[in-house]
Image (spheres, rainbow, N blue to C red):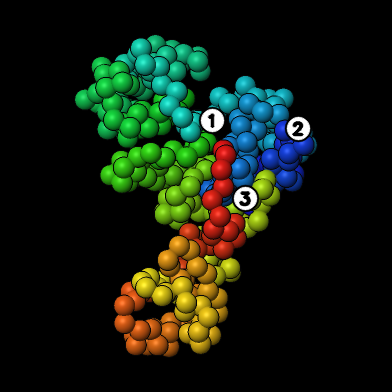
Amino acid sequence: MQAPLFECQHLVKRYDDATVVDDLSFQLQAGECLGVIGPNGAGKTTTLRMCLGLSEPDAGTIQAFGLSMPRDALAIKSRLGVVSQFDTLDPDFTCAENLRVFGTYFGMTRNAMEARVPELLEFAALTHKADAKPGQLSGGMKRRLSLARALINDPDILLLDEPTTGLDPQARHLMWERLQQLLQQGKSILLTTHFMDEAERLCNRLLLLDHGKKIAEGTPRELISQHLEPDVVEVYGQDALALVNTPLADLAQRTESSGETVFFYTTDAAPLLQALSTHTGLRTLHRPANLEDLFLKMTGRQIREGA
């Protein structure tokens, strides 16, 4: 098997008495998109910060391209592209100037930048906004400009921290299209996200973190088949919650309730759907199990506060 492009072994990060990342190991292969998912406070952003050399681990090792972080941080960073969770574009510069200024940080010559900037603006669908400042851009345009800026040095690996948060569906889909193009070009991506459809669409493999620990790892399909029943029947309506205490619940392998909805997880939905058809006033949705079901089963339905 080919050596990983990026590898973390037994990472630990503590803040005061809290262990934010706890014995975390993973690898990123060339041309792969590895997704890191988990609830708020799971350690996703802290892990990315250590991978970028912005925070030093209390234990463990980080290696990329045969080099070690933080010892070889500058050499590693020269081959990375980063899109942070929050907008860091310079509001005083135009789109083209934001790209040029960033290129100077990597020692690019003026001629190299002048050749690269038009390509990146076209990739980001921002050619017509080359002379506009970030304040004149929509949220989706800003995120695409941030992605273009991260590509100025033609990096081998992109580290993306929730790159589509706050975008409307059209903007998210355009961003996904651009990321898929980069994967087809052979780029590697380490991605954190709260969107399970994004994780399933883009990621070859997933790490599921909770309380700083890796609790599951695999392809989206592998994780769903390993941890979930294949069919889900959602039931809504008056008295839906009372169904969990009736013989109907015996027709499923597992039930969960959230708000006014009951989720029946089953290997054969037909008997359950037949039984539910006699209950007037109830609405049902029959669907295959998905990553959101996995996420909720493994980490719980309770809302977590904090970063």
Residue 63: x, y in percent? 68, 36
Q: Amino acid at mark 1?
A: Leu
**Dot 1 lies on which element?**
strand
Q: Amino acid at mark 3?
A: Leu
The crowd level at tag 3 (other Cα within 10 Å; few <14, some 14-19, many 20+) is: many
Q: Amino acid at mark 2?
A: Asp
Q: Nearer the viewer, residue 116 or 21?
A: 21
Which of pointers 2 and 3 indicates the residue nearer the eye? Answer: 2
The residue beneath circle 3 is 209
Q: Look at the picture and state if 236 lies above or below 36.
A: below
Residue 46, quarter of the rendered image? top right
The residue beneath circle 2 is 16
Residues at badges 3 and 1 in contact (C-beta under 8 Å)?
no
Farthest residue to the left: give it: 128
Residue 244: x, y in percent? 51, 78
Residue 180: x, y in percent? 39, 46
